[in-house]
């Protein structure tokens, strides 16, 4: 699934990840790592949304909020 909406979800997730890293005063990983991490978060959010019927964007935000250092 590499459609337009998925690409937008990944772009939004990358932005949220960057914000999270900066807020935690952590070194920002390279863009390739961020893209892979964002894609994984989006995949997990979609899996959770299918199980629970929740909003994907809210799940993405929760997953990023719960990231460990």
Image: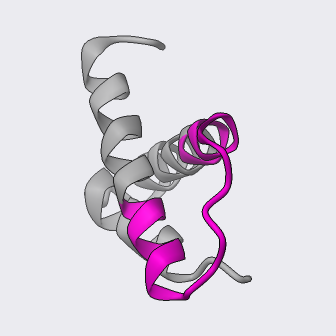
Closer to us: 3 or 47: 3
Residue drawn at (45%, 62%) of the image: 18
In this view, 3 is above or below 54:
above
Query: x, y percentage for residue 57?
Result: 28, 56
Range of the magenta residues? Answer: 16-38
Query: x, y percentage for residue 39?
Result: 56, 37
Is 20 part of what is drawn in magenta?
Answer: yes
**Which image quarter is the C terminus in?**
bottom right
Q: Main secondary structure of the magenta part?
A: helix
Closer to us: 57 or 38: 38
Residue drawn at (47%, 62%) of the image: 17
Question: What sort of colour scheme is used for the picture?
Answer: one colour
Query: x, y percentage for residue 12?
Result: 30, 46
Query: x, y percentage for residue 46?
Result: 46, 43
Closer to us: 25 or 16: 25
Residue drawn at (64%, 47%) of the image: 37
In this view, 32 is above or below 20:
above
């Amino acid at each position: 699934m590499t459609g337009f909406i998925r690409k937008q979800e990944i772009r939004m997730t990358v932005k949220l990840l960057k914000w999270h890293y900066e807020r935690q005063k952590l070194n920002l990983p390279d863009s390739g790592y961020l893209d892979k991490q964002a894609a994984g978060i989006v995949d997990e959010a979609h899996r959770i949304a299918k199980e629970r019927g929740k909003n994907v964007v809210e799940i993405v935000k929760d997953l990023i909020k719960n990231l460990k250092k």
